[in-house]
Amino acid sequence: MYQADRRCPMCGAALAASGRRYCSNACRQLAYRTRRSPGGEPVRPDGFVGRHNELSQVQQAFEVYRLVTLTGPGGVGKTRLGREALRHITGSRAAPVVEVDLAVVAGDDRLVAQSFAAALGLPERHGMTLVESMIDALNKSRVLLFVDNCEHVVEPCAVLVDTLLRRCPRLRVLTTSREVLDVTGEFVLRLGGLPVPESVAPGALKGSDAVRLFVDRAEGFELTQENAPHVVAVCTALDGNPLAIELAARQIPALAVEAVHERLVDRFDLIAGRDTAPRRQRSLSDAISWSYELLSPAERTALARLSVLTGQFDLETATAVCADETLPADEVLGLVRRLQSTSLLVSGADTGTYRLLETIRRYGKERLREKGETDATWDRLATWLAGLLELCVEQPVWFPMETHRRLVAQADNLYAAARHATGDVDRQTVLSIAIVRIWMFQGQFAESQEYLRAALARTASPRLRCVLLGYAGCLSTLQGDLAAATSAMEECLAIGQAADDVPSLLDGHYTMAFVQVANQRLDVATRHYAEALALARGLDDAEAVAMVLDRMAWKALVEGNLDEAERLVRQALPVFLQPSPPHGAGFALHNAGSIALARGDADEAEKHFRTALTVVTPDSIEVSFVLDGLGMVAARRDEPKPAMRFFLAAASMRGLRFFNEPTWRRQVATSFSDARRTVGQSGADDITEEMVDLVCEDMITLALHAADTGTGEPLDDDERAIVTLTLAGLTNRQIALRRGISPSTVSARLRSIRGKLAVDSRAEIAAWAQENIASQSPLSQAM
């Protein structure tokens, strides 16, 4: 139902009485590109305790200021307060939130802008810098940026934030830093420790956030009048620092609270005479040191070695950096679990990943330096990461798609390891290749080219140079510089011929053909593809042969030679349908579907496109092509609503995808326009709104079930609650806040509801609810 004060969540413009969520198509499309939420850090199962006054101050500050900075010593809870504040702010205003975690930048000023752009999902645009691209996008939206851990790059961060705020009037920014950004118009909230009680009276204990935090984090602990003095003493000694209190509380039940107090006081007395640091900083450092000293020697070693890892990491990565002749690999899992139990290591919820809090990671790096193990630990990490890339470098043309997924998961560690691998040029080059590949998929072409030039300048290995030149040729093609692309591939072919290196020659001919197809020189491309195919067959490399055949099939399709295209793609498909396919499986199946469409066989096309969605990974570049293909199938069948869903799902992902082939794009644009015209403006608005909060995996699921008909099953209690909130006019994000679930979960439940009711839109869901459950209070039923 319409509310007179409703405003567009992207630009803030007043909405007309139509009940639409956005004021224009431009804002709808921007909602796709800026779809993010806070929570990049692994989820912690612990609840948020206290800070009610600070939460209120942050919310009130954003009524007046566009930049709010939470500052204070390490461990004081800046990040957790920021996330909790954003949960309340975005719940009330439905503003998209983009989180930028600068802890992973590791002091490299050049990566600050890239971190912002990657978080926003903004690729480089032709003729624009990354900063200009951000300004252009943010001027069309109402976004709240959450920039975490700014202190080690405070100057470049301050310059960028100041630029964005001055150039983007709708932008608001929340930052956390041990230092203020010192930007004009900055509101600074300085955090201290949690309040500790002045007595052990029941009322004082109940009102103390510090005591409540200790009790909440101490496993199986119950506060009594007997142990209360010790709890208060521990919280007081630690100056109410949340992280310090949590570390102390985690020693229970291994130690009684009396023992925790006694050992903590003994340690403070020991170092009090020789430490000149501010007391509040000493309390946290001492709490971490005390927790560290309670660890076994093997646990201390593991914590110190894990400190080289930034961002999230899995057990395999932990083993790679921890295990050596002194620490067996089969012991690492137990060590990681014990570090997690003491809160020195944070675990992701059901993700199998871990992360060191930044304060503890810095402490661990100091211990690693004291042990004299810094270089050896970095060497193990770099060697292991380079090993992941072995196939990408040694095999021509192809690599396993699983490898790309692992590279993306290790992106933060790749950046850091490459900086520390300067003693081994070849290994540093291999790591640089991985970084370039990741940046290419993010659309950061100019930065990738700069990185490639630096790598080429120091690399003498013929094979590695050819791999680098292949990426340079691809990047130049994507940037429209076909002369530079041709030059790079000519150099690659010359090196391969001089070294008589077949893999390099195969790479060169394959990529040169790609360049020439983009250059519309199809006869030249044909010759290079023929050379590449002969070399691949000479190597008896089935995957390489399939990759070449697949691209040859696409060229034949572009030329209109359907018989040849079908013959080639049928030869390639068996390799792409094996259990562990090479990258490009989605493209091969897309080719097969496109050929079937060209022949007018929608059923055959759908089969290939749907199979493609079962083999591609959500972060692969094929996904948007495949979703467009399913949209084309639905359009051919005169099913405009499913077609719209497919096309919109593909469009929402396209900002992160490189290279959209022009022939295909023209076909898609025509079908999309026809479907939109058929469903009408109101129908298109409904379909667009229901998809705004979907993440990539949701889009694939939606694509696979977009044409499902009603099941006739009754709605469960949760679904009825969501229906009533939909009837009340709440958005997915507002429903998620009310129900305590994620927006993507709301979207998934709405899909289930549409299937059960055999309806296509939120408006039809609301109409059903009006008939069936309108007599009950929507909001009260949903509580």
Image (cartoon, helix red, strand yellow):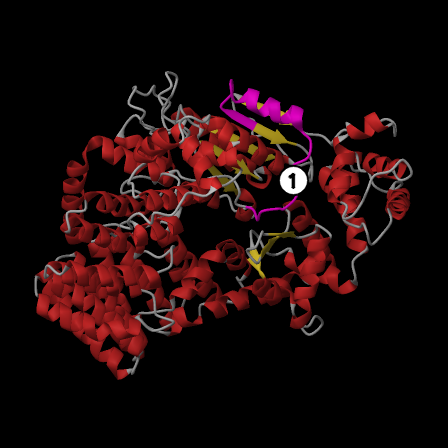
Give the image quarter of residue 391. Answer: bottom left
Taking the image as shown, residue 655 lies to the left or right of residue 45, namely left
Q: Position of residue 616 (x, y in %)?
A: 34, 61
Up-down relation of residue 512 to residue 23 (above or below)? below
Q: How far from the left and from the top, in percent, is residue 236?
A: 83, 34
- Against 80, is 604 above or below? below
User: Considering the numbered disc 1 on the image, is that residue within a helix, a strand or a loop?
Assistant: loop
Indicate yes or no whether the magenta region holds residue 42: yes
Callout 1, which amino acid?
Gly
Above or below for 587 versus 280: below
Q: Which x, y percent locates residue 514?
A: 21, 62
Residue 281 seen: yes
Residue at the spot 44% in from the left edge and 64% down from the top edge:
429
Q: What residue occupies the far top of the structure in this picture? A: 4
Against 338, residue 181 (above or below) is: above
Q: Nearer the viewer, residue 359 or 618?
A: 618
Residue 106 vs residue 557, the one in the foreground = 557
The stretch drawn in magenta includes residue 3? no
Residue 505 in view: no
- Which quarter of the figure is the N terminus placed in? top left
Q: Which residue is mark 1?
A: 47
* 779 left or right, relative to 30: right
The mark tally for this picture is 1
Give neighbour class at mark 1: few <14, some 14-19, many 20+ (Cα, 10 Å).
Answer: few
Q: Residue at x 75, y 46 (%)?
A: 247
Q: Residue at x 58, y 47 (%)?
A: 43
Name the spot of residue 260 as percent of width and height, x first.
86, 47
Highlighted magenta segment, given as a residue range = 41-68
Q: Nearer the viewer, residue 199 or 166?
A: 199
